Amino acid sequence: DYRRGGYHAVRIGDTFKNGRYVVQSKLGWGHFSTVWLAWDSQRSRYVALKVQKSAQHYTEAALDEIKILKQIAEEDPDDKKCVVKLLDHFKHSGPNGQHVCMVFEYLGDNLLTLIKYSDYRGVPLHMVKEICFHILVGLDYLHRRLSIIHTDLKPENVLLLSMIDPSKDPRKSGASLILPTSKNKIVAESSSSKEIKSSNGDLTRNQKKKIRKKAKKAAQSCAQKEASSENDANPEDSNVDAKSNEDPVEEQSNGSVIKDDSANSDGPKDACQAKRGRRGSRSTRQKLLAAADLNCKLVDFGNACWTYKQFTSDIQTRQYRCPEVLLGSKYSTPADLWSFACICFELATGDVLFDPHSGDNYDRDEVILTGSLGIDDGTSWHDAAQGGRYSRDFFNRYGDLRHIRRLRFWPPTKVLMEKYDFSEQDANDMTDFLVPLLDFVPEKRPTAAQCLSHPWITGGPRLLEPSMPSVKLEVKDGNISELKEEKDGREAM
Ligand code: ATP
Ligand code: MG
Ligand code: MG
């Protein structure tokens, strides 16, 4: 993918936008981009820099992503809606073409990393509920207020916020601020003026001095904050080796690029499976605990669309793809709720809900469809199964599966108890929340707003356990606000 139209080869110390952003380390990657921790020398803070592949298709997707991100930010000035904030954007020219770059607030680990910290055994239920609550706040905002469908919800696209201080170095090594490398030349284009500014990437001695001074100041203020807050966990643990095992490319400090061809759309999942069953190390358990103050945000709006303006019928990552999309029928906001339910199951159990392998006589999509029918014990899917562009590939004209004759009902409560050691109460409660979201018929799935008032969420630790949150919150019309009496009561104590 490091060729014309593909990724831009970024090296530690590279600068972007005329020296403003200095690359520190790699945060993650996706099929559209690589994402880097960068130091914003103008505002003295760490940011996440997403460098998109350069082919026209990716550039158009990035420009749509920016449009959607701007709309998202405009309607959420108080930053309460659990969606990532876009800070800046510009274009960067390199040997592989011109790359749209997006600058985001720096966030923490993605949920796949959190699942990894649990050694694929599932994270504690109170954390699952907490995360689900925040995802639902984000979805409710996108769906009801903005008519936006995310269309690519998966654990990698939900990031934790815990313990983030943007002025503090989040890297595990605690290495000092990396200054721009001297040999790189950059050509940056300002997104607003569209005026090409060609410049040498080197910063002057004065600029370097300024960066060092700002970094030192930021570090000092962080040290003061840390000293004053006993309960603060170590922020350096908050974003370590995210997806590092699945990374397709590794940047060497000498600037060479190692490629790993194993990257494909199912890659991260396969890597997860391979590691399942290993004993939990102390450090992974500690990282899980360290993430316990959970708050999270939705990221990656590269495939998002509006309910009234859709770009493609080919949406979602396979394991999180809903039946209507598999069948080539029309889709809307319930598609996100399906993916949300898959994430919820995966968080709670450590297992991907629908992780299909193709057999002799059926393909992977058919396996997902069959699995979803196994959860839905109703018969209403017969109608929903018809009418999609690919319906005939899977179903005959009576609405029965073509290749798979016997469908065994999969009682989720039993599976949660027998396979995942849930107590009967926990299994019943979670099934009650989850199964309606996995309805084959999209219109029958609850909305994000309805989910937010489900007892599985409202009865979660946020509202029940006084030791967890510092204040109690309530959700009204999709807005999170502090419960007045509770706050007053607590302050009086
Ligand atoms: P996809 O293949 O899912 O379409 P993509 O190329 O669109 O991916 P993103 O999902 O936006 O890229 O980002 C890739 C990864 O980079 C994320 O999974 C996450 O681990 C990391 N990342 C993205 N944004 C941030 C951020 N603001 N802070 C920290 N890490 C981030
Ligand atoms: Mg992504
Ligand atoms: Mg994306």
Image (cartoon, helix red, strand yellow):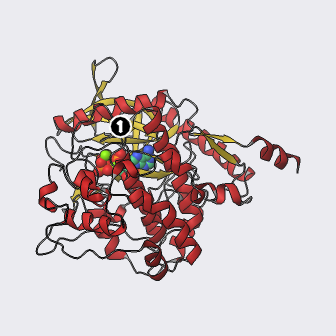
Determine which residue is flagged by label 1. 15
Q: Is residue 307 visible?
A: yes
- Residue drawn at (56%, 51%), measured in percent from left and top? 295
Give residue 349's quadrant in the image.
Answer: bottom left
Quarter occupied by residue 408: bottom left
In-front residue for pair 429/59: 429
72 or 181, nearer to the observer: 72
Q: Nearer the viewer, residue 219 or 117?
A: 117
Q: Is mark 1 on a helix, strand or loop?
A: strand
Q: Residue furthest right?
A: 492
Image coordinates for residue 160, horizontal then vertical, percent: 51, 53
Q: Where is residue 467 in the image (x, y as percent from the top left)?
A: 73, 60
Q: Residues within 10 Å of mark 1 (few under 14, many from 20)?
A: many
Residue at 60% x, 57% y is 455
The picture places residue 149, in percent across and down from the top left corner, at 36, 40
Residue 422 horizontal/vertical position (percent): 53, 77
Q: In this view, does 398 lie to the left or right of 157?
A: left
How many numbered callouts?
A: 1
Let me know if residue 12 appears in the view: no
Residue drawn at (46%, 60%), measured in percent from left and top? 240
Q: Nearer the viewer, residue 366 or 20?
A: 366
Q: In this view, does 79 lie above or below 452?
A: above
- Tell me if 408 is positioned left or right of 5 in this view: right
